[in-house]
Amino acid sequence: MAAVTRVPFPNPISIATHKCVYSSSRTRLPELSAISSLKAKNLRRFSVVAMADLNKSTVLVTGAGGRTGQIVYKKLKERSDQYAGRGLVRTQESKEKIGGSDDVYIGDIRKAESIAPAIQGIDALIILTSAVPKMKPGFDPANGGRPEFYFEDGANPEQVDWIGQKNQIDAAKAAGVKQIVLVGSMGGTDLNNPLNSLGNGNILVWKRKAEQYLADSGIPYTIIRAGGLQDKEGGVRELLVGKDDELLKTETRTIARADVAEVCIQALNFEEAKFKAFDLASKPEGTGTPTKDFKALFSHITTRF
């Protein structure tokens, strides 16, 4: 009698559990393939987004509540494909004034520990903090004479333009920041400049000291000594660069805040702007050719301080 081979019958539970494998593999495999393809596409899309984020430069502008600082912060946010912009302001009121976003930090530059969270993780720092003189009450132009100015307690140029900027530079260096753009003012070569007499603050003296500290820090820097700031449209004038206050001896001693803001951001894009210090002004609107080639502009600068 021939031997009979016994074939074990599969467990019914196993069949029910794995029916997609036993009975429907031909219909399921294309679906699995489609899912895998979709996952791959999503992964590639995620990778592209992640790479784009990695390519962004995280930039903090301090003094973001000021008239020029607001413009820089706005420009950074408008160029979100290039920059992850942050702001540092002194009060909640200033934060709300520029939108109240979570990327706006509140801190006191005179206290190093209060600005550390804003600086942590950034690639570049744009410093636009400055002591602001206030006019003493009671001045009447009709009576002739000149107005008198003062600085609020704790907010004089030594505390803000020297100690405050030194704190920012030190914090940036500790955090490994790759570049600092510092906005100062023309006139620092002249101790008798009228700006130094405002409130007896010697504001240009303290600004110049902070600039020297930055230049000696070893961090790649761009020091912009702006001329008289004007609340005018930017991008419509030919910009001029100079050194040692030579532009103060000409008729071109002013510049739009919007142009200063643009130069601050453009300085982050070109090696030609690093380890440079320069005066900045512009020709009157309607004369010359509006500056568009910022690499060429920075290439004209030869002074390190």
Image (cartoon, helix red, strand yellow):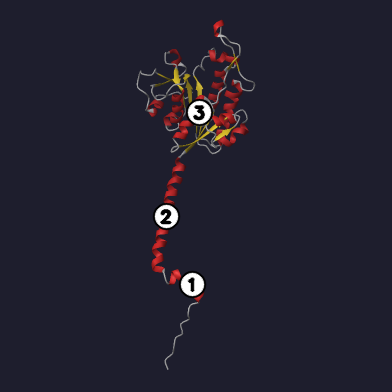
Left or right: 199 as drawn, with respect to 45 = right
Q: Are marks 2 and 1 in contact (CB under 8 Å)?
A: no
Residue 144 visible in this rendered orientation of the protein: no
The one of 221 and 48 positioned closer to us in this rendering: 48
Disc marking residue 70 = 3
Label 1 with label 3: CB-CB less than 8 Å: no
Q: Residue furthest right?
A: 153
Q: Residue at x 45, y 18 (%)?
A: 254
* Amino acid type, mark 2: Ala
**Residue located beneath label 2 in the image:** 40
- Residue at 44%, 48% (x, y): give it: 47
**Looking at this view, is 193 or 283 the one in front?**
283
As drawn, the label of residue 16 is: 1
Q: Quadrant of the N terminus?
A: bottom left
- Say few, some or many: other residues with alpha carbon within 10 Å of mark 3 (under 14 / 14 to 19 / 20 or more): many
Closer to the camera: disc 2 or disc 1? 1
Please report the residue visible at 42 percent of the width from the left and 55 percent of the height from the top.
Answer: 40
Task: Identify whether 77 is placed above or below 204.
Answer: below
**How far is the residue under mark 3 from the one under mark 2?**
42 Å
Q: Quadrant of residue 303?
A: top left
Q: What is the x, y in percent for residue 170?
A: 58, 31
Residue type, mark 3 in image: Gln
Give the class, few, some or many, for how many residues have Cα within 10 Å of label 2's Cα (few <14, many ≥20).
few
Q: Identify the secondary structure beneath mark 1.
A: helix
Q: What separation in Å lies between label 2 and label 1 (alpha carbons)?
A: 31 Å
Which of the marked residues, 3 or 2, is nearer the chain's N terminus?
2
Percent x, y for residue 298? 41, 26
Q: Say if 243 sits above or below 85 in the image.
A: above
- Nearest to the eye among marks 1 and 3: give it: 1
Badge 2 or badge 1: first in the primary sequence: 1
Type of amino acid at the residue the image marks with label 1: Ala
Q: Secondary structure at mark 2?
A: helix
